[in-house]
Amino acid sequence: MTERPRNLLTPAQIEATARAVHEGQTDKAGMPYAEHLRAVAEGVRARGGDEEQIAAAWLHDAVEDGKLSEQWLREAALSRRTRDIVLAVTKRSGEPPEVYAARVLATPGALLVKEADLAHNADPARLAVLDEATRGRLAEKYARMRTLLGLVAGTRPDHPAPAD
Protein backbone atom coordinates (compact mmCIF):
# COMPACT_ATOMS: atom_id res chain seq x y z
CA MET A 1 0.00 0.00 0.00
CA THR A 2 1.34 3.42 -0.87
CA GLU A 3 1.78 6.03 1.81
CA ARG A 4 -0.74 8.87 1.96
CA PRO A 5 0.92 12.23 1.21
CA ARG A 6 1.42 14.22 4.42
CA ASN A 7 -0.40 17.31 3.22
CA LEU A 8 -3.77 15.55 2.79
CA LEU A 9 -6.49 15.55 5.41
CA THR A 10 -6.42 12.44 7.57
CA PRO A 11 -9.38 10.05 7.58
CA ALA A 12 -10.29 11.35 11.06
CA GLN A 13 -10.24 14.96 9.82
CA ILE A 14 -12.45 14.08 6.85
CA GLU A 15 -14.95 12.31 9.11
CA ALA A 16 -14.93 15.25 11.54
CA THR A 17 -15.51 17.70 8.67
CA ALA A 18 -18.41 15.66 7.33
CA ARG A 19 -19.98 15.34 10.76
CA ALA A 20 -19.56 19.07 11.41
CA VAL A 21 -21.10 20.27 8.14
CA HIS A 22 -24.09 17.93 8.52
CA GLU A 23 -24.57 18.78 12.24
CA GLY A 24 -28.26 19.16 13.03
CA GLN A 25 -29.35 17.59 9.72
CA THR A 26 -31.58 14.52 9.83
CA ASP A 27 -32.44 11.95 7.20
CA LYS A 28 -35.95 11.11 5.97
CA ALA A 29 -36.35 8.74 8.92
CA GLY A 30 -35.49 11.50 11.40
CA MET A 31 -32.08 10.05 12.32
CA PRO A 32 -28.93 12.20 12.56
CA TYR A 33 -27.55 12.50 9.03
CA ALA A 34 -24.05 11.60 10.19
CA GLU A 35 -25.33 8.07 10.81
CA HIS A 36 -26.05 7.73 7.09
CA LEU A 37 -22.55 8.98 6.27
CA ARG A 38 -21.05 6.51 8.76
CA ALA A 39 -23.08 3.65 7.29
CA VAL A 40 -21.99 4.49 3.74
CA ALA A 41 -18.33 4.75 4.80
CA GLU A 42 -18.61 1.39 6.58
CA GLY A 43 -20.36 -0.07 3.53
CA VAL A 44 -17.48 1.07 1.33
CA ARG A 45 -14.96 -0.42 3.77
CA ALA A 46 -16.89 -3.73 3.93
CA ARG A 47 -16.94 -3.91 0.11
CA GLY A 48 -13.15 -3.58 -0.03
CA GLY A 49 -12.97 0.15 -0.69
CA ASP A 50 -9.75 2.03 -0.13
CA GLU A 51 -8.99 5.14 1.95
CA GLU A 52 -9.87 7.53 -0.89
CA GLN A 53 -13.25 5.88 -1.45
CA ILE A 54 -13.99 5.90 2.29
CA ALA A 55 -13.12 9.61 2.39
CA ALA A 56 -15.49 10.20 -0.53
CA ALA A 57 -18.20 8.23 1.27
CA TRP A 58 -17.99 10.61 4.25
CA LEU A 59 -18.30 13.59 1.88
CA HIS A 60 -20.64 12.08 -0.71
CA ASP A 61 -23.65 14.29 0.04
CA ALA A 62 -21.88 17.45 1.26
CA VAL A 63 -21.84 19.30 -2.08
CA GLU A 64 -25.24 18.00 -3.20
CA ASP A 65 -26.84 19.12 0.08
CA GLY A 66 -25.16 22.54 -0.17
CA LYS A 67 -23.12 21.93 2.99
CA LEU A 68 -19.82 22.38 1.15
CA SER A 69 -19.19 24.16 -2.15
CA GLU A 70 -17.46 22.75 -5.19
CA GLN A 71 -14.83 25.44 -4.59
CA TRP A 72 -14.21 24.07 -1.07
CA LEU A 73 -13.89 20.60 -2.56
CA ARG A 74 -11.39 21.81 -5.19
CA GLU A 75 -9.28 23.61 -2.57
CA ALA A 76 -9.48 21.03 0.23
CA ALA A 77 -6.47 18.88 1.04
CA LEU A 78 -8.02 15.81 -0.58
CA SER A 79 -6.65 13.51 -3.24
CA ARG A 80 -7.80 14.18 -6.77
CA ARG A 81 -9.45 10.75 -6.83
CA THR A 82 -11.48 11.52 -3.69
CA ARG A 83 -12.60 14.84 -5.24
CA ASP A 84 -13.51 13.12 -8.51
CA ILE A 85 -15.58 10.49 -6.70
CA VAL A 86 -17.46 13.10 -4.64
CA LEU A 87 -18.23 15.12 -7.77
CA ALA A 88 -19.27 11.99 -9.65
CA VAL A 89 -21.84 10.99 -7.01
CA THR A 90 -23.13 14.57 -6.61
CA LYS A 91 -26.48 14.86 -8.37
CA ARG A 92 -27.06 18.04 -10.32
CA SER A 93 -30.40 19.81 -10.40
CA GLY A 94 -32.58 18.60 -13.28
CA GLU A 95 -30.06 15.97 -14.32
CA PRO A 96 -31.58 12.83 -15.88
CA PRO A 97 -30.79 9.64 -13.91
CA GLU A 98 -29.14 8.13 -17.00
CA VAL A 99 -26.62 11.00 -17.19
CA TYR A 100 -25.92 10.73 -13.47
CA ALA A 101 -25.40 6.95 -13.69
CA ALA A 102 -23.08 7.33 -16.70
CA ARG A 103 -20.90 9.79 -14.75
CA VAL A 104 -20.71 7.44 -11.75
CA LEU A 105 -19.77 4.53 -14.03
CA ALA A 106 -17.13 6.62 -15.83
CA THR A 107 -15.36 7.69 -12.62
CA PRO A 108 -12.94 5.16 -11.15
CA GLY A 109 -13.98 4.25 -7.60
CA ALA A 110 -17.35 6.02 -7.67
CA LEU A 111 -19.52 2.96 -8.28
CA LEU A 112 -18.51 1.36 -4.98
CA VAL A 113 -19.42 4.54 -3.06
CA LYS A 114 -22.76 4.81 -4.82
CA GLU A 115 -23.45 1.11 -4.24
CA ALA A 116 -22.90 1.55 -0.49
CA ASP A 117 -25.08 4.69 -0.51
CA LEU A 118 -27.92 2.91 -2.29
CA ALA A 119 -27.64 -0.10 0.02
CA HIS A 120 -28.06 2.07 3.10
CA ASN A 121 -30.80 4.20 1.51
CA ALA A 122 -32.76 1.06 0.60
CA ASP A 123 -32.23 -0.68 3.95
CA PRO A 124 -35.67 -2.13 4.81
CA ALA A 125 -35.29 -1.15 8.48
CA ARG A 126 -34.58 2.43 7.45
CA LEU A 127 -37.47 2.53 4.97
CA ALA A 128 -39.90 0.88 7.42
CA VAL A 129 -40.32 4.08 9.45
CA LEU A 130 -41.52 6.02 6.39
CA ASP A 131 -45.11 6.27 5.22
CA GLU A 132 -46.13 3.76 2.56
CA ALA A 133 -46.21 6.24 -0.34
CA THR A 134 -42.72 7.57 0.43
CA ARG A 135 -41.38 4.06 1.02
CA GLY A 136 -42.72 2.90 -2.34
CA ARG A 137 -41.47 5.95 -4.23
CA LEU A 138 -37.97 5.65 -2.76
CA ALA A 139 -37.77 1.88 -3.24
CA GLU A 140 -38.64 2.36 -6.92
CA LYS A 141 -36.12 5.21 -7.30
CA TYR A 142 -33.30 3.18 -5.72
CA ALA A 143 -34.14 0.06 -7.76
CA ARG A 144 -34.05 2.08 -10.98
CA MET A 145 -30.65 3.55 -10.11
CA ARG A 146 -29.30 0.09 -9.23
CA THR A 147 -30.43 -1.09 -12.67
CA LEU A 148 -28.84 1.90 -14.44
CA LEU A 149 -25.58 1.22 -12.59
CA GLY A 150 -25.61 -2.51 -13.36
CA LEU A 151 -25.99 -3.42 -9.70
CA VAL A 152 -28.77 -5.91 -10.35
CA ALA A 153 -28.04 -9.60 -9.81
CA GLY A 154 -26.71 -11.22 -12.95
CA THR A 155 -25.54 -8.02 -14.65
CA ARG A 156 -21.98 -7.90 -13.29
CA PRO A 157 -19.45 -10.65 -12.54
CA ASP A 158 -19.30 -9.56 -8.88
CA HIS A 159 -23.11 -9.63 -8.64
CA PRO A 160 -24.02 -13.09 -10.02
CA ALA A 161 -27.57 -14.13 -10.54
CA PRO A 162 -28.94 -16.40 -7.79
CA ALA A 163 -28.57 -20.13 -8.42
CA ASP A 164 -31.76 -21.97 -9.33
Image: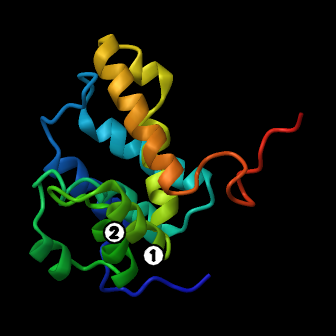
Q: Residue at image x 49%, y 76%?
A: 108
At 62% from the left edge and 47% from the top edge, which residue is drawn?
A: 152
Residue 20 seen in this snapshot: yes
Q: Is residue 135 above or below residue 86?
A: above
Bin the neighbour count of mark 1 within 10 Å (Cα to Cα): few under 14, some 14-19, many 20 and up: few
The amino acid marked with disc number 2 is Ala
**Position of residue 107 measured from the top left corner of the image (x, y, whole percent):** 43, 75
Which quadrant is the N terminus positioned in?
bottom right
> Is residue 105 or residue 94 the one in the foreground?
94
Q: Is residue 130 visible?
A: no
In the displayed structure, 135 sits above or below 53; it is: above
The residue that disc 2 covers is 88
Q: CA distance from mark 1 to mark 2?
A: 8 Å
Are the residues flagged by discs 1 and 2 in contact, CB closer than 8 Å? yes
Q: How many marks?
A: 2
Q: How is the image coloured?
A: rainbow
* Circle 1 residue: 106
Q: Amino acid at mark 1?
A: Ala
- Quadrant location, the C terminus: top right
Q: Position of residue 103 (x, y in %)?
A: 37, 70
The residue at the point 28 percent across, 63 percent down is 13
Disc nearest the viewer among 1 and 2: 1
Q: Secondary structure at mark 2?
A: helix
Residue 68 in picture, x, y percent from top left? 12, 61
Residue 6 is drawn in which quadrant? bottom left
Q: Nearer the viewer, residue 81 or 6?
A: 81
Q: Position of residue 119 (x, y in %)?
A: 50, 40
Label 2: few (<14), some or many (≥20) within 10 Å? many
Label 1: which secondary element: helix
